[in-house]
Image (cartoon, helix red, strand yellow):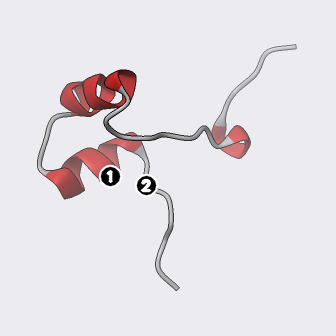
Amino acid sequence: MPRLLLTVPEAAKALAISRSKLYELIASGAIQSVRNPAESSWTP
């Protein structure tokens, strides 16, 4: 089964762009992103 989500570094590599460029595209709305709460670190 193929993966449906990629991390930022994985997506940047797949698109052959830098991570910072990918973050710019996400911020501009050109690429949609979602957070994975299982991988987020929270301090109560």
Look at 64% across and 43% down and name the residue there. Answer: 36
In this image, 41 relative to 21: left or right? Answer: right
Residue occupying the far front of the picture: 29
- What x and y, as percent, mark residue 43? 79, 15
Crowd band around label 2 with a 10 angstrom C-alpha radius: few (<14), some (14–19), many (20+): few
Look at 38% across and 30% down and name the residue there. Answer: 29
Give the secondary structure at mark 2: loop
Near-viewer residue (24 or 11): 24
In the figure, 44 relative to 15: above or below? Answer: above
Q: Disc 1 marks which amino acid? A: Glu
Residue located beneath label 1 in the image: 10
Give the secondary structure at mark 1: helix
In the figure, 3 relative to 13: above or below? Answer: below
Q: How far apart in space, not on screen, are marks 2 and 1 (Cα)?
A: 6 Å
- What x and y, as percent, mark residue 41? 69, 27
Tags 2 and 1 in contact by the CB under 8 Å rule? yes
In this image, 21 relative to 10: left or right? Answer: left
Q: Disc 2 marks which amino acid? A: Leu
Residue located beneath label 2 in the image: 6
User: Number of numbered discs present?
Assistant: 2
Crowd band around label 1 with a 10 angstrom C-alpha radius: few (<14), some (14–19), many (20+): few
- What x and y, as percent, mark residue 9? 32, 43
Near-viewer residue (14 or 25): 25
In this image, 5 relative to 39: left or right? Answer: left
- What x and y, as percent, mark residue 39? 65, 41
In the figure, 18 relative to 2: above or below? Answer: above
Residue occupying the far top of the picture: 44
Q: Quadrant of residue 8?
A: top left
Which of the image's four quarters has the C terminus?
top right
Identify the disc placed on residue 36: none
Look at 22% across and 57% down and name the residue there. Answer: 14
